[in-house]
Image (cartoon, rainbow, N blue to C red):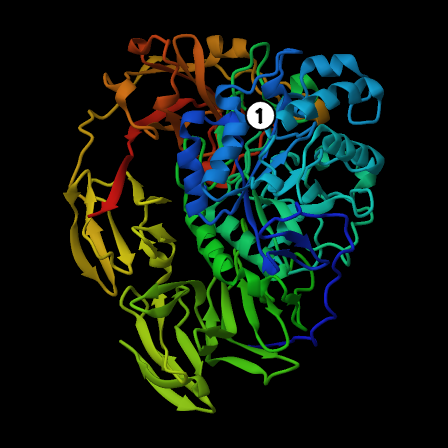
Amino acid sequence: MPHLLRVPAPAAPPLTGHLPFADAPGAPDPIEVTSRYLTRGGRPWFPVSGEFHYARYPARDWEEELLKMKAGGVTVVASYVIWIHHEEIEGRVRFDGDRDLRRFAELCARHGLDFIPRIGPWCHAEVRNGGFPDWLLARTRAPRTDDPAYLEPVRGWFTAIAEQLRGLDRAHGGPIVAIQIENELYDQPGHLLTLKRMAQEAGLRAPLWTSTAWGGVQLPPDELLPLYGGYTETFWTEADGGWPDTCRKHFFFTHQRDDEGIGADLRPTTVRGGDPAPTDRFPWATCELGGGMAVAYHRRPRVEPDDIGALGLTKIGCGSVWQGYYMFHGGTNPAGELTALQESHATGYPNDLPVLTYDFQAPLGEYGQVRPSYHALRLQHLLLADFGDLIAPMESVLPERQPASQSDRDTLRWAVRGDGTSGFLFVNNHQPHEPLPAHPATSFTVDFPDAPALTLPSAPITVPTGAYFCWPLRLNVAGLRLDWATAQPVCRVQDDGRTVLVLAATDGVPVELALDAGTVTSVDTPSGAVDKADGRVLITGLRPGTDALVQVRTADGNDTGLLVLDATTARTAYRGTAWGAERLVLSPDSVVFDQDELRVHSSASRPSFAVLPTPARPLTVAGAPLSATADGVFTRWTTEEWADGDIAPAATLVRPAGPPPKTATGPLGRASAPADEHFAVSAAEYHVKLPDDLPHRPSGTVLRVHWTGDVARAYVGDTLVADQFFSGRVWDIGLDRLPAAAPRNHGLRLLLLPLAADAPVYLPERAGDVTGRAAVWRVEWGTSRAWAVRAG
């Protein structure tokens, strides 16, 4: 079916200088905000931010995890500064160990990552009291207002934060590009302004001051940059509510920025759908695109990698100019000195969360696990790193024929980001829960006001079920004009003096490259056919892979390459500086770039990775050379074989489960997590022997528990070390997190409660019926080794 879209004439230049945001005088790359996009150093800037809560992760591993985030395409790290984590006991403000805010910010700066402290004072973040210490709530009856009894301790808290971040602002070359005030406060613009002024008086400085803007929020005019979000699934809806419509809409191309569902369980329904912040004065920026989702007791969503990937790409097509993910990295709640620190019914919140785990099903997990969603998002972030400055100023345009409603699964969902002559075409044919049908005989016509219309591909294609992709329209690459490609741009890389544009094919879609003939003098392709007609050189039948390099001599005498990777290989692509040059690395494992060293974290017995361009010197690990073989235009390097030598772990049943405990309910009538005493009466108990060499294990070694039940807890002695609510996912327990002083020789005790048949709890369909059962089916070690690769 043909699809038509008309790109309007370029709009008037965006508003500039209309907002009271200013970078530090003399900043070499000043950050500014226009009404449509952000700029940095005078160029359009498309940030990618990812949330990582330093206080929920061991400080010893911060640096490696930040490097993973950077390798994943994150350019800005955001983190709540959670008050109760730092001052649980009044007057004893802790910034030591895992709470060392300054060290975390300095590590961001060391590795070229920007930093956004989200300073609250109320954060939510599924933390006890939303992050407020208990003593603070005893002090005031009107928190989150201008009540003097509330503002006085807040002023002290902001002063403590400012002292930690002194000298890390942009005026001193520091990484802080923005500061978020409060969180999800929807009806008190005056109080938000008070908090901003207090933070400034305390000495906090940043070019951008931000606020969450969902749920019809009221913001002080022009004082805070509104940031939006959108999740694939939520835990805060009712257990029997099905897939929320507020989540469903994020898989359509639309220009509606607000998500009325985020935080809706904590505000009256009367304020939902209020007047949105003015879209003609602010760009469409986000801070909470769902990188996953937490699991509450009453509702346990399961988020799949393509759900996250499709949502991210769709938001770019909708007009986002700032991709911000919550969470990008999971973590674990610290142990409180006075109480547990999770959100719970006991503190009046509508959801019971696990005591410890805050994994969030994030791209990087609670123990640093690399998830498939990390690879799906990295592919998009590579696109933004190279072409974000082109995409950001382009307006989002919707086709003439659009879905009639959110229940319309038959109309193809697509959009274009375009200017007067060029653009990017976005298609999303994926959504959770309800698969979208394939679209046979599909073609697109994009009509530009200042250039001839493009109709592509040359022959109609089928858009497969589950596909989502971005195609370039009149993209200039080192003197070559690519009129279109039925493959997604990934990045550019320099190889032997030529620019190579790397593209990713889509499974089920034939690769087609259309080159403007006026920019081409010769073409050499390893497969397929080359035809010239209507002013274009058309390449069809190309087989994507590591050898699918089309070599082009441009009209101005340059050599340019177009490398089309197959879809699976493209998701293994990393780009970073290694051994003195920027390189493309293909690896299914986790790769980080750290100055002259590339580290590969792998559980494979003999991991390998491919590199383009090939380093001039051989690569080594611990001084021993790696073997090298050709892999298309790449060189593939393979490590020596290794095995961890572990005896397979076993879970020994100590006590079978008793009858399920009766389900209690809390706020909003939602099911409450079982009380501690139920574990002594009803839980099945298993014992797992720990390895003798546990203290010497590398970070990232986990015990993977395949289980069925309701709630699981792991103990070393009497110390709770891990927990999970069942949703059909494997339960990982980080062995390097076990307390050093605990009696390890006793091993791990696993306690599993069964689920009552009448419990008002939502489980994903694929989790199956688990009522009345509590059992461990299998346990295994998940051991990963870090290979430090150097040149020469």
The residue carrying pointer 1 sits among few (fewer than 14), some (14 to 19) or many (20 or more) residues within 10 Å by Cα, namely many
Q: Is residue 515 left or right of residue 743?
A: right
Query: Is 156 placed above or below 402 here?
Result: above
* Residue where numbered disc 1 is placed: 353
Image quadrant for the N terminus? bottom right
Q: Is residue 455 left or right of residue 376?
A: right
Residue type at mark 1: give it.
Answer: Leu
Query: Is 724 placed above or below 460 here?
Result: above
For image coordinates 52% across by 24% down, the residue present is 100
For image coordinates 44% across by 55% down, the residue present is 379
Residue 614: x and y, percent? 25, 59
Between 613 and 587, the one nearer to me in the picture: 613
Secondary structure at badge 1 equals loop
Residue 359 can be seen in this image: no
For image coordinates 35% across by 64% down, the residue present is 494
Q: How many marks?
A: 1
